[in-house]
C-alpha cells in the first residue's frame, strides 16, 4: 500500500457559533463518537450504519489493568511490555478492525501512558507505596513516557492508516484519568525528593531540617500548623497537571501541531479529595498544547435517573479558554451485563459487580437516559463519545436508530449561528480550596448542591474562580460552591458587594440550598425560570430538553413565543407559543427544536 501523505488530515478546536467546535480538514465536524474497551466485541459497523464517523480506540503502552486496585487481565497487550522491542500489533489490529467496518472512519486513539512491569522493576525508588505503579512526579517517568509517546506517534504517522488519525487523547494514572495511582497523592518517602524540589522552587528559604517523614502527613487529618500538608496537596495537583501539559506538548511537536490533543482532567466538581491530583485545571486552561478536556458524565448518586449528569469539571471555564469539552457517555442500558458475563476472560474474579455496573430495567428506561445524556451535550455544545465498555450495550435496533438521529441533530446544530445560550446564573468553584478543607464538612457540599442546581428550572454556567473577574458581570445571580477561606473567593464576594451583584455562598451553617430556595433567589433577581417543578431543563438558542423526575403535567416557559418541534419522537408535539404544556411519565426525556 502506498504510504499516505502525513499532512492529508488535520484537526483543530476553534470557536464556531459562539462555542468551541471540532474542525476536521478545515470544516466543522460533529464530535459524536463511539468507543469500546474490547474491540473484539465492537459494534463499529452498527454505529457506522447509524452515521458515525468518529471513533476512539484504547491503546495501552503497558499490558496492565487500568485500575491499580484491581489486578485483572489487561484488555490487550501493551506496546512496550518487552523492553527494547515495541510491539504495535495490538493497536494496528484494532485500527484495521475498525476500518474494515467503517473505511472512512476518523480516529482519535486514547493512549494510556502507564509504565510496563520492567520499568517498575528497574525503578523501585520511583514507585508509590505499593511498589507496583509509577509516581506521577518522577522526571524519569516523564522522560520515558515522552519517548514512548514519540515512538507511538511516529509509528502511526508512518502507518498506512495515518490519514485516519485526527487527534490524540493522552491518558494515564489510575483509571486513565490522571489520578495518583494510590488515590493518596503518591504520599510516600519515594515522593520526598520531588516534594523538596518543589519547596525549593516555591519557598527557597524553607528549612528542610524540620521536614518530617511524608508518611506523617494525612489528607484526612486536621490542619497542620506549618501548612506542610497544604503545600503537599498543592504540589500533588500541580505536578499531575504539569506532567499532562508536557506530554501534550510532545504530541503537538511530533504532529507538527496538525491535530487536536486532549486529556481527562479537572474533576473539581466531582472529586473532593485533593489527594487524587485533579485540582489544577487552571494549569491546563493556560496550556496551548491542550485542545480538549474530558470527563465521564457525573456519577452523583450512582447515576440515579433523577439527577443532572453534569460534567465533572467547571466546563464553562474550559469553553471560556477556547477548549472543547468532550464527555464520556458511559450510559448503562437494558443490555448492559457485568464484565464477568460479557467477557469472562477479563474479569475472572468477578470484581465488577457493584450497583454502578448494573444495566437498566427496560429499553424505555435506556432510551430516556440516553436522551437525557445527549440533550446536555447538545445544548452545551460538548463533544462526546458513547462508551460501550464491554460491547453490546447499544445493540438494539431502536437505540441505534435513535443514536443515529442524535448524530444528525448534532450535525444540524453546527449550522446555527448562535450555539451558546446566555445563562443568567453563574456558579463558581475554587479548586484550590480543597487543600484547605481536609477535615471540613463543606468538602462534600458540591455534590448535594449540584443535584439541587439541576432541579431549579434555570440554566446555569459553572466556572473556576480564577475566571471570576472576566465573566461575573454577565450574570444576574451568583453562587459560590466552595471557598475554604481562600483569598480569590473572598475578593470575588467583595467585588459582588461593590457592584451590587447578588450572590449566595455555602457555609457550615448553610451547606446546601434546595431547588425551591434557588428558584426563589432566581425570581428575586430577575433570572428567567423555564420550569417551576423539580425537573431537569436544558436550553440552548435552538434546542430545549426536559427530563421529568416525577409524572405529571409540565409547563415550560420559553420567555418569548417560539416555534417548537419535538425531536426523536414520531408525531411529537409541534406548534408555536411561549408556554409548552404536556404530560410526562416519570424519568421521561423530551427534546425540542426551537426556531
Image: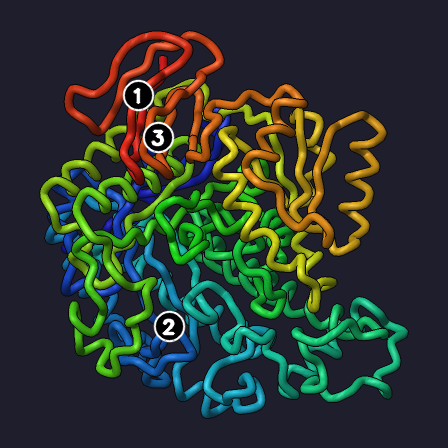
Q: Cα distance, mark 1 to mark 3? A: 39 Å
Task: Work out whether residue 571 or residue 118 is closer to the camera in this orientation and state it.
Answer: 571
Q: Which residue is mark 2?
A: 66
Q: Which residue is mark 1?
A: 582
Q: Cα distance, mark 3 to mark 2? A: 35 Å
Residue 546 visible to an observer of this rendering: yes
Dot 1, crowdedness within 10 Å: few (<14), some or many (≥20)?
few
Q: Cα distance, mark 1 to mark 2? A: 46 Å
Give the mark, 1 or 3, whose residue is nearer the N terminus: 3
Asked if 270 appears above or below 338 in the picture, the reply is: above
* Residue visible at 31% across and 40% down in the picture: 587
Most distant residue in the front direction? 552
Residue 565 percent coordinates (x, y): 27, 17
**457 sits left or right of 232 in the view:** left
Give the mark, 1 or 2, whose residue is nearer the N terminus: 2
Secondary structure, mark 3, is strand
Q: Which residue is mark 3?
A: 27
Residue 222 percent coordinates (x, y): 75, 74
Residue 163 visible to an observer of this rendering: no
Nearest to viewer (mark 3 / mark 2): 2
Asked if 412 appears above or below 336 in the picture, the reply is: above
* Residue visible at 32% across and 85% down in the picture: 82
Give the mark, 3 or 2, whose residue is nearer the N terminus: 3
Secondary structure, mark 2, is loop
Task: Work out whether residue 86 or residue 93 is closer to the camera in this orientation and state it.
Answer: 93
The answer to which quarter of the image holds residue 276 is bottom right
Nearest to viewer (mark 1 / mark 2): 1
Amino acid at each position: 500500500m502506498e504510504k499516505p501523505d502525513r499532512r492529508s488530515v488535520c484537526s483543530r478546536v476553534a470557536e464556531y457559533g459562539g462555542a468551541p467546535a471540532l474542525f476536521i480538514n478545515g470544516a466543522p465536524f460533529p464530535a459524536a463518537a463511539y468507543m469500546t474497551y474490547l474491540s473484539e466485541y465492537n459494534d463499529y459497523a452498527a454505529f457506522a450504519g447509524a452515521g458515525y464517523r468518529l471513533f476512539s480506540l484504547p491503546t495501552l503502552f503497558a499490558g496492565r489493568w487500568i485500575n491499580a486496585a484491581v489486578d485483572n487481565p489487561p484488555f490487550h497487550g501493551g506496546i512496550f511490555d518487552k523492553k527494547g522491542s515495541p510491539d504495535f500489533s495490538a493497536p494496528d489490529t484494532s485500527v484495521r478492525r475498525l476500518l474494515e467496518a467503517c473505511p472512512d472512519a476518523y480516529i482519535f486513539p486514547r493512549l494510556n501512558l502507564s509504565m510496563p512491569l520492567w520499568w517498575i522493576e528497574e525503578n523501585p525508588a520511583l514507585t508509590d507505596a505499593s511498589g507496583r505503579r509509577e509516581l506521577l512526579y518522577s522526571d524519569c517517568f516523564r522522560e520515558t513516557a515522552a519517548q514512548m509517546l514519540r515512538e507511538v506517534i511516529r509509528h502511526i504517522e508512518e502507518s498506512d492508516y495515518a490519514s485516519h488519525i485526527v487527534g490524540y487523547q493522552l491518558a494515564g494514572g489510575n483509571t486513565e484519568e490522571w489520578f495518583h495511582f494510590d488515590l493518596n497523592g503518591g504520599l510516600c518517602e519515594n515522593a520526598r525528593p520531588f516534594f523538596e524540589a518543589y519547596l525549593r522552587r516555591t519557598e527557597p528559604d524553607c528549612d528542610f531540617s524540620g521536614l518530617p517523614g511524608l508518611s506523617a502527613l494525612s489528607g484526612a487529618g486536621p490542619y497542620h500548623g506549618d501548612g506542610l500538608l497544604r503545600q503537599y496537596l498543592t504540589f500533588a495537583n500541580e505536578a499531575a497537571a504539569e506532567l499532562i501539559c508536557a506530554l501534550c506538548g510532545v504530541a503537538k511537536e511530533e504532529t507538527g501541531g496538525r491535530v487536536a490533543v486532549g486529556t481527562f482532567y479537572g474533576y473539581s466538581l466531582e472529586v473532593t479529595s485533593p489527594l487524587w491530583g485533579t485540582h489544577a485545571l487552571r494549569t491546563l486552561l493556560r496550556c496551548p498544547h491542550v485542545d480538549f478536556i474530558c470527563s465521564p458524565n457525573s456519577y452523583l448518586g450512582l447515576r440515579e435517573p433523577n439527577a443532572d449528569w453534569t460534567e465533572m469539571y467547571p466546563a464553562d471555564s474550559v469553553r471560556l479558554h477556547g477548549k472543547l469539552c468532550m464527555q464520556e457517555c458511559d450510559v448503562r442500558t437494558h443490555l448492559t451485563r457485568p464484565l464477568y458475563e460479557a467477557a469472562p476472560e477479563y474479569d475472572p474474579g468477578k470484581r465488577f459487580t457493584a450497583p454502578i455496573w448494573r444495566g437498566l430495567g427496560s429499553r424505555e428506561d435506556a432510551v430516556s437516559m440516553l436522551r437525557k445524556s445527549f440533550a446536555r451535550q447538545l445544548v452545551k455544545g460538548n463533544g462526546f463519545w458513547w462508551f460501550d465498555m464491554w460491547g453490546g450495550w447499544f445493540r438494539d435496533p431502536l437505540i441505534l436508530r435513535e443514536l443515529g438521529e442524535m448524530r444528525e441533530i448534532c450535525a444540524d446544530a453546527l449550522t446555527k449561528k448562535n450555539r451558546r445560550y446566555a445563562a443568567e446564573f453563574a456558579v463558581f468553584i475554587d479548586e484550590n480550596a480543597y487543600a484547605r478543607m481536609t477535615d471540613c464538612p463543606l468538602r462534600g457540599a458540591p455534590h448535594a448542591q449540584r443535584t439541587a442546581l439541576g432541579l431549579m428550572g434555570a440554566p446555569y454556567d459553572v466556572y473556576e474562580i480564577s475566571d471570576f473577574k472576566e465573566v461575573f458581570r454577565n450574570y444576574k445571580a451568583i453562587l459560590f460552591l466552595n471557598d475554604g477561606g481562600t483569598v480569590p473567593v473572598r475578593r470575588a464576594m467583595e467585588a459582588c458587594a461593590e457592584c451590587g451583584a447578588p450572590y449566595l455562598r455555602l457555609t457550615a451553617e448553610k451547606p446546601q440550598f434546595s431547588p425551591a430556595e434557588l428558584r426563589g433567589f432566581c425570581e428575586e433577581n430577575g433570572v428567567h425560570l423555564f420550569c417551576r417543578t423539580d425537573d431537569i431543563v436544558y436550553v440552548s438558542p435552538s434546542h430545549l430538553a426536559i427530563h421529568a423526575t416525577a409524572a405529571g403535567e409540565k409547563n415550560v416557559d420559553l420567555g418569548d413565543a417560539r416555534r417548537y418541534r419535538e425531536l426523536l419522537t414520531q408525531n411529537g408535539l409541534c406548534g408555536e407559543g411561549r408556554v409548552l404544556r404536556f404530560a410526562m411519565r416519570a424519568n421521561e426525556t423530551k427534546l425540542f427544536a426551537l426556531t
